[in-house]
Amino acid sequence: KDTIMDGENVDQESSIEELNKSIAKSAFDKLQDDRKTLPVYPYRDELLQAINDHQVLVIVGETGSGKTTQIPQYLHEAGYTKRGKIGCTQPRRVAAMSVAARVSQEMGVKLGHEVGYSIRFEDCTSETTVLKYMTDGMLLREFLGEPDLASYSVVMVDEAHERTLSTDILFGLVKDIARFRPDLKLLISSATLDAEKFSDYFDSAPIFKIPGRRFPVEIHYTKAPEADYLDAAIVTALQIHVTQPPGDGDILVFLTGQEEIETAEEILKQRTRGLGTKIAELIICPIYANLPTELQAKIFEPTPEGARKVVLATNIAETSLTIDGIKYVIDPGFCKMKSYNPRTGMESLLVTPVSKASANQRAGRSGRTGPGKCFRLYTAHNYQHDLEDNTVPEIQRTNLANVVLTLKSLGIHDLLNFDFMDPPPAEALLKALELLYALGALNKLGELTKVGRRMAEFPLDPMLSKMIVASDKYKCSDEIISIAAMLSIGNSIFYRPKDKQVHADNARLNFHMGNVGDHIALLKVYSSWKETNFSTQWCYENYIQVRSMKRARDIRDQLEGLLERVEIEVTSNVNDLETIKKAITSGFFPHSARLQKNGSYRTVKHPQTVHIHPSSGLAQVLPRWVVYHELVLTTKEYMRQATELKPEWLVEIAPHYYQLKDVEDPTSKKMPRGEGRTS
Ligand code: ADP
Ligand code: MG
């Protein structure tokens, strides 16, 4: 009997293997068929001819027409990769990763082999990679190691209409190298129709238009402005879901960021639970930049029969990612946008009304596979009269210190005459030069110093890089790179479930013992985790997100590698917190603030009222002087991640920046004592 069973099993196994193979084969064939249905496909040969005939080509096509996933494959099939890699830049990390994953599937290869991606702190490419998707910022950094991009045969600056800072700088750099590398092909691709501007900039490069398929989109406005757009968006989504037949299309909601998306997700879950079983299932799919990779794929999974999907997305779904099957778009009309005040050097991320161009892109997402509907949660009058026509390019509303440092390292000195498509405000350029000078990255003549050269090796903001470079002097590079890695994660380290807030807060306070400040607390979190041999259990017990910690460890490893490159020894000085704080201050001294009588703070250099963020370990302590990592504007201007400092350090560390009078106590005329108020 046994033998018979065995025989059966063997048979079954081999037939299952066969079956799996044939399923994989048919999935692959289906992908190949899908590729042929994309709007770009009929233009494949014409497009390849145009690329052959012209060095620079501007390509325009609606979102979803296949620009990003198909064109690099066409070029590969046509043999371009025999001469070098094809690089395709994306403004967003998530897009670079997800598009690379898709293309590797379509080509039937493993991600990271022929098709790979490169984003900051994560290189998923290898020797064999010929199609490389990357963030625009990463290509910018590649110029540092390979100023003529010799290993590339084609560079495709994709999503050019997004006009991110890095894309704008890339324009100038690739235009320049194209002059002395006639063999390099340059593609500038964009989802919007005002391609003339790109063409003009690239010496009248020809424009190749991929005719799109577009179905009519009905636009609905609200009659009166919405007081609470988040609630209005949720209500609208639920109304669509319960009144429209299931299976007729999915919903896409544009929100401004992770927190908002998580809130919406929670409320939607609660309210759908109350709907009972008669109503079809509503599958909630969030998508934002920091969403863990394994969850990102969910938005692309086909909606099961009888259910409906609601995608809660940031701007990323405007043009960077195409989600099939969307019939309804809900557009509250806001996005999070960086703004920069060159006078004070303050940067903030603000929830801002979108531009008309953005609103139209958003609406267009609903009409890709059939007629769609877009619900704008603002009035028609708002749209007509209050929205700007176009979004201001990032270069005109951001801190330029990082870019200026990169350009200086590339040997580009005359920044005022750099070939910008739209120049940044002169004031912002000056401010960046000033900051880099203050940090010691540039000398009085504006030339890169040795410190600046070392700083440029780190893919970080100049203040963070300076903090790391300065840690050499204070012999605490080991601690400082942990802090830098933890700061780079943002605010997703501590986990605070609604039903266990007290426990979570207590766990967090443990790391703040002795009022060490937020930077040292982050260091303690990292070192404690390391001591447990990176235990997941430990993270659970301490209400810490293990995923964020793993990412911090990755980043830290890379920073450690970079230390070696700039010949800084890894040295530890863990028992001398004051020294570690001094190293932090060496990078962040421009971010110092002094306590006011009413419990608020005043920034020292460009006086402005700010507050310690309630999540800070120092929120109840209120030391007299602090140095902070960044400002965030929510209900007030908050300092996030603050550490106490002694004012005399400012004069000691940055004598060219602070004078005694800046840090003197105005009432006593004496040097203030450094100790914080310990009430
Ligand atoms: P474009 O760059 O012109 O906006 P894409 O090349 O990104 O267009 O997308 C073409 C098609 O590929 C989309 O309509 C979508 O069906 C599919 N696609 C793209 N990315 C993914 C992905 N990560 N997962 C599944 N399908 C995808
Ligand atoms: Mg694209």
Image (cartoon, rainbow, N blue to C red):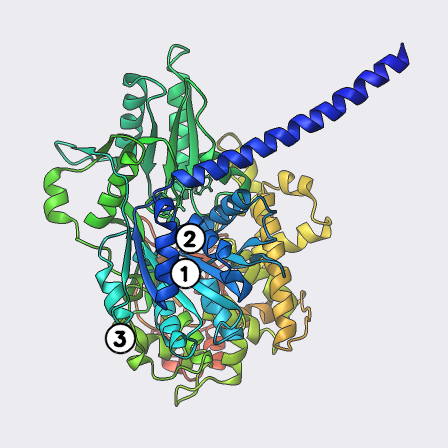
- Where residue 640 appears, as percent x and y from the top left, is 43, 56
Residue 317 placed where, x, y %? 36, 43
Q: Can residue 432 be seen in this view?
A: yes
Label 1 element class:
strand
Q: Do the residues labelled 1 and 2 touch (CB within 8 Å)?
A: yes
Q: Mark 3 points at which residue?
A: 427
Disc 1: which residue: 156
Tell me which corner region of the image, top left, top right, bottom left or bottom right, holds residue 562.
bottom right
Residue type, numbered disc 3: Glu
Between 358 and 402, the residue placed more toward the observer is 358
Picture layout, residue 149 above or below residue 555:
below
Q: Earlier in the sequence, mark 2 or mark 3?
A: 2
Q: In which quarter of the image is residue 4?
A: top right
Q: Mark 1 against mark 2, which lies toward the viewer?
A: 2
Residue on which the image places disc 2: 71
Establish if 230 lies above or below 271. below
The reply to whether discs 3 and 1 touch (Cβ–Cβ < 8 Å) is: no
Judge the density around disc 3: few (<14), some (14-19), many (≥20) Cα neighbours within 10 Å. few
Q: Name the residue located 46 percent from the left edge and 76 percent from the top edge.
A: 650
- Residue flagged by tag 2: what amino acid is it? Ile
